[in-house]
Amino acid sequence: MADKTIVCKDCGKEFIFTEGEQEFYKEKGFENDPVRCPECRKARKTQKNNVKR
């Protein structure tokens, strides 16, 4: 497995999906690569958590 460069679907910025992250996703049973960069994932998670409160 090699690092992958992916374009974030929210901000359009390129980010690296590292070999270690790919292993982690595989261990967790995730079948799809991430579609958002770490910053957008964090912002989306924060937004979802704020809605539930």
Image (cartoon, grey):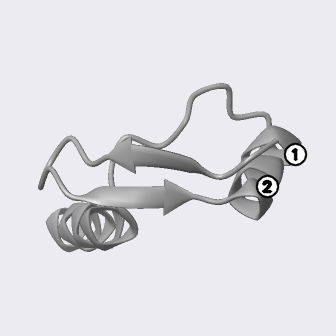
Above or below, 32 relative to 37: above
Kind of residue sitting beneath label 1: Glu
Task: Name the residue: 74% across, 47% down.
Answer: 2
In percent of width and height, residue 27 lies at: 87, 45
Secondary structure of residue under mark 2 = helix
Q: Pick the residue in front: 45 or 14.
A: 14
In percent of width and height, residue 49 lies at: 29, 69
> Which residue extends farthest right?
27
Task: Name the residue: 26% across, 74% down.
Answer: 46
Above or below, 6 relative to 51: above
Q: Pick the residue in front: 52 or 15.
A: 15
Q: Pick the residue in front: 26 or 19.
A: 19
Residue 24: mark in rendering: 2
Give left or right: position of 27 versus 34: right
In the rendered image, the quadrant that contains the N terminus is top right
Task: Name the residue: 50% across, 60% down.
Answer: 16
- Answer with the quarter of the image where residue 30 lies: top right
Residue 27: mark in rendering: 1
In the rendered structure, are the residues bearing label 1 and label 2 in contact, judged by CB atoms less than 8 Å apart? yes
